[in-house]
Amino acid sequence: QVQLVESGGGSVQAGGSLSLSCAASGYSYRRSCLGWFRQAPGKEREGVAAIDSEQRTSYADSVKGRFTISQDNAKNTLYLLMNSLKVEDTAMYYCAVRLWSSDSRLSVDYNYWGQGTQVTVSS
C-alpha cells in the first residue's frame, strides 16, 4: 500500500525559504512519477513540480527558477526546496504518486496523495 507523509511546512516571510519533505513507501520509483501540488482556499489544486522515473523534472511557470524538486530513492523521500517565497505561494502543499513513469502535473493523473502540509508566506 502506498503511503505518503509530508513535513516541513510552516510560516515564513516573503523572500524566505522552506524545504518540504515527503516520506513515501509502497511503490516502485522506477515505474512512477512523483509530484508536488498545492491548493489555496477557493482555488483549484495546482501542479507545482514533478519528477519522473528518469529524474527529469518539470515546473509550473509560477515557480520556475524558485522551486526545486528532487528525490532520494535510497531514503524513499521526495523534496521540494522553495526559495524566494511569495505571498501567493501560500497554500496547502501535497505530494502525490503517479503509477506511471512519465511526467505529469495534472492532479487527475495521480493515484495516491499525502495529507498535506501548510505553507504560509507573509508580507
Image (spheres, helix red, strand yellow):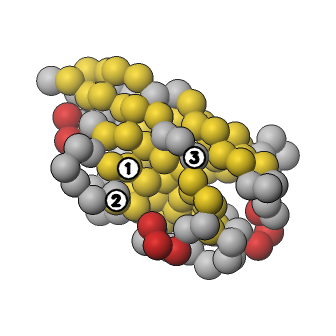
In percent of width and height, residue 48 lies at: 40, 56
Q: Is mark 3 on a helix, strand or loop?
A: loop
Mark 2 belongs to which amino acid? Glu
In percent of width and height, residue 19 lies at: 50, 32
Q: Residue at x 81, y 64 (%)?
A: 28
The image quadrant that residue 110 belongs to is bottom right
Q: Residue furthest front?
A: 1
Mark 3 belongs to which amino acid? Gly
Whole-number angstrom distance, CA of label 3 to CA of label 1: 11 Å
Q: Nearer the viewer, residue 119 or 71?
A: 119
Ranked by sequence position, the earlier of labels 3 and 2 is: 2
Q: What residue did someone put label 2 on? A: 46
In percent of width and height, residue 74 lies at: 84, 46
Q: Is mark 2 on a helix, strand or loop?
A: strand
The label shown at residue 114 is: 3
Q: Which residue is drawn at 34% across and 21% down?
A: 11
